[in-house]
Amino acid sequence: MSVRVPRLHRTASFAALLGSLALPVSALPTSAFADSTTITTLPPVSVTANRVPTAAEETGSALTVITREELEQRQTQVLSDALRAVPGVAVNRTGPMGTLTQLRIRGSEGNQTLVLIDGIEVNDPAAGSEYDFANLLAGDVERVEVLRGPQSALYGSDAVGGVVNIVTRRGAGAPRFGAAVEGGSFGTAAGRASFGTGTDRYDLFLSGQGVTSDGVSVADKRLGNPEKDGYRNGTLTGNAAVRPTERSEIAVTGRYTRFRTDTDGFIGGRGAVDDGTSTAGEQYFGRLQGKIALLDGKWEHIVGLTHGRQQRDYRDDAKTVTSRYDGRKTKADYQTNLTLKSGPADHVLTAAVEHEEDKAISRSSFSSFDRSIGSTGLVGQYKLGLFDRLTLTGSVRHDANDLFRDATTWRTTAAYLIEESGTKLRASYGTGVKNPTLFELYGYTATYAGNPDLKPERARGWDAGFDQALWGTRASVDGTWFDQRIRDLITGTGRTSVNMLGESHIRGFELGLSVEPIDRLTVRGSYTWTDGEDSTGAELVRRPKQLASLNVNYRFLEDRANANLGVVYNGRSSDWAYDPFYNRQVVNLAPYTLVNMAGSYALSEGVEVFGRVENLFDRRYQEVWTYGAPGRAGYLGLRLSL
């Protein structure tokens, strides 16, 4: 099956999650339909950076936020497309929409990034504890925070490279309905509908969205693969909260996705080929949370229970299920935050305990396994603010694990604000641990056998940077230098997985720029240079050395109309090619530039037409060896709000 071969090696392999955190639902944005504020490089308040709400000027880690306003301006359909513009983030998709989509932060593996949706860890234990972004539609997303650098001290095993925290919309104000429909190239049709309402005592938000497409060939059609591979996705989400008192809340959130993707097979020596295979699956995620604040809100307690399940069936051209994967994750957590003030100093003490059970089940004609792993994590953090200028944090985490030796990780950050010049200096240092995944340990396919003798990877990394306001508040620039080292990196040999001897090294820098030269015209750009080598000196695959993006947005006609231009550059990268015996060699993938255009116009209050063109210049490219990508595409739609 097409998705299996790329996952045989570590750059696309299955990986393991022992990470942790229940982000308070009550701390998330509460505006379901209100206009979003203008996007900035750093959000006004971040929950991800320190597990507690932290102002932008107090954040010592590198963090980027994407708001709903930006997603709507770009008319983003799948969230991974918006993440391509984040500094330090590389996205690889094995074909058109709906196929395996991996995200790598600062050259780390896809399974070294922890992904949260409304406080729920969605990394899949049966897919190497990696989250596949293929089926994450953007229609209900309110905000995305991307935290870069080792974060195991706060979040555990899967956060060696960073954390992606996705927050969906919530209800507020009088009852409001929203709907949108669109259609266009490749026989694509999409729609979504939502309802939200809320007061000081409660809020409710419900959303449904879906997409269907005839698609293009997953296997690159330039290599003689003409068939179309379609995609179907239906997603339902909902959240509700009740606040019995001013300082207490009970909240619940849930998410369900059902999908089917036509895929293509993979043959050693040829790569991806048309063969009529497909993948169908379901995802269930839910969280129940209670929160109470004592001592006039200074002492906060949060307790939560989370469960997730992800099932995938791989089918042959006769629609017979050839293999099935079932990943389950259950977590119970408790966190307490105590805020104190003494003269010029602000203190925030955080402690947390969380227990997690991961389970992976595989059934196929040639093998099966049913394995689980449990872990308990203890977290402590101290955040100190001095004179409204200097903020220091120190974090430590101890993880007890059923299979591996106990691990202790730590992190420290510093942020210094110079208000007179609009400058913020920041730095962070952290350690990380990444446990072998259940598939790497026990998985088995026709061409792969797990290695139960694998040991955890160990990471350490630092970054240092600045955020500088320019031209009053009309412009800002930020830069970050980062350096990360990973010992005992797990890599694939084509037939199994092994720990590499020595230390792998990844370094680079990130630049960001935001300018508003005139009212309603915003220009944002980013550039990332990454140099990653394993312990033998070989280049890490699917990590482009250069990434860049540019986005220009203009609102006009008294804000009734909006025009958006987006450019994404993906530099040269390498990948693995397999001979008929599945021995591998390195091949180069050519750089490419994608240009997208989008526009909208409000016909009346609550009625808007919109359209976009993707891949304007019909660029032909590969993100994964022998896997194709869509050419030029156009879409038109209508959006309603009542």
Image: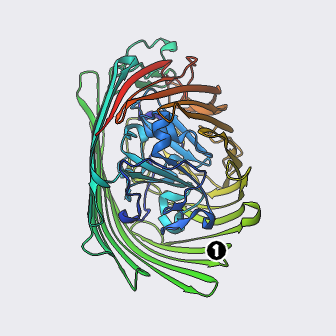
Label count reads 1
The x, y position of residue 424, in whole percent, is 70, 62
The residue indicated by pointer 1 is 392
Q: Residue at x 45, y 66 (%)?
A: 404
Q: Say few, some or many: other residues with alpha carbon within 10 Å of mark 1 (under 14 / 14 to 19 / 20 or more).
A: many
Q: Nearer the viewer, residue 478 or 155?
A: 478
The x, y position of residue 446, in whole percent, is 38, 35
Image quarter of residue 233? top left
Regarding residue 600, the answer to whether it shows in the image is yes
Residue extending furthest toward the bottom: 342
The x, y position of residue 208, in whole percent, is 27, 40
- Which amino acid type is shown beneath numbered disc 1? Leu
Q: Residue at x 37, y 57 (%)?
A: 30
Is residue 267 positioned above or below 246 on the image? above
Q: Nearer the viewer, residue 473 or 209?
A: 473
Q: Quadrant of the C terminus?
A: top left
Regarding residue 209, the answer to whether it shows in the image is no
Q: Residue at x 42, y 64 (%)?
A: 20
- The image's colour scheme reads rainbow
Q: Does dot 1 land on a helix, a strand or a loop?
A: strand
Q: Residue at x 52, y 61 (%)?
A: 46
Q: Is residue 253 left or right of 379 when viewed as pictured?
A: left
